[in-house]
Amino acid sequence: MSAGARVTVIDNFSTGRMDHLQALLPQLELIVGDLSDVLGLERVNIDDYEYVFHLAANPYIPPSVEDPRFDFHANLSNTFNLLEALRHADRKPRLVNISSAAVYGNPARLPIAETDPTVPISPYGVSKLAGERYAEVYSRIYGLRTTSLRLFSVYGPRQRKQVVFDLLLRLRADPTRLVVLGDGSQVRDFVYVLDVVQAAMLAASVAPGQGECYNVASGTTHSIRQLVAAWCDVCGLTPEVVYTGQVRPGDAEKWSVDITSLERLGFKPMTNLTAGLVAIRDWYDTITR
């Protein structure tokens, strides 16, 4: 919108919140509903747009393990229906399809590159990988311009799930004792939300658009123990830290990421972990005062 673009948002608010968009509502069109229903009822005209950023999905592994049918619809059915709508459009807008690092499963080697084997270990990873493949095939056969972004551990203000936020919530609930899933050795590449936005804009503007995929990460790894220490430092706390030793089904143990392909498009991560945690802390303390 700051670039003068007309923006339409489609959201069923199964995970998002209306108040996150409240300040922007005068500047954008909001359509509330499931993506497949919105497309089927022709509540939006695809030909009106130049770019489509596809984030309509189940964004988490645990719900896919608990209810694979739900994940199949939220991720793969919605992606397929969107690709069909784009295929039949006259203008054929460019598609930036948001995928996930979960397509790799437990990686064959580190750091993970886009050319490495994709062997997902959760229904979520399977549905995301299938969506990528559909986008690539539709690009090759029907001439759609598509790019998929494999997001790693995204974090930032307003996100109310995932390990980064969960740790802050626990610290605020009990500053003296922090219980953490696993043993602390799990390794992740945490990428700040504004860096993800930068990657999406690059994918829309300068990527080839031939069904290719890009890793989106910071290029820097942190263990869960390091994340815990960083949160304690940012919050000025020294709690007793207890690790459960248990991990969630479908979660990979260690991820480090090769972002060379994305860097060739001009990507430069701008926010380090400490700055990102400070931004989340300030946002959370503001809304809980």
Image (cartoon, helix red, strand yellow):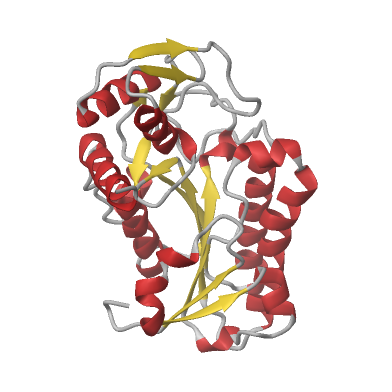
Give whichever of 120, 8 is nearer the camera. 8
Q: From this viewpoint, is residue 211 visible?
A: no
Q: Residue at x 42, y 15 (%)?
A: 184
Q: From this viewpoint, is residue 139 visible?
A: yes
Q: In which quarter of the view is residue 138 placed?
A: bottom right
> Could you tell me residue 192's position as x and y percent?
32, 46
Give whichever of 204, 151 is nearer the camera. 151
Farthest residue toward the right? 69
Residue 84 sits above or below residue 13 on the image: below
Give whichever of 117, 105 is nearer the camera. 105
Q: Going by the image, does 151 lie left or right of 81?
A: left
> Could you tell me residue 36's position as x and y percent?
71, 70
Q: Residue at x 48, y 38 (%)?
A: 162
> Could you tell me residue 6's position as x and y percent?
40, 84
> Could you tell me residue 226's position as x and y percent?
31, 21
Give whichever of 91, 287 is nearer the camera. 287
Q: Residue at x 45, y 18 (%)?
A: 179
Residue 148 sits above or below residue 247 on the image: below
Q: Going by the image, does 163 lie left or right of 131?
A: left
Q: Going by the image, does 27 lie left or right of 270?
A: right
Q: Going by the image, does 63 lie left or right of 6?
A: right
Which quarter of the figure is the N terminus placed in? Answer: bottom left
Q: Residue at x 31, y 54 (%)?
A: 194
Residue 246 sits above or below residue 271 on the image: above
Q: In which quarter of the view is residue 208 placed?
A: bottom left
The total of numbered circles placed on residues is: 0
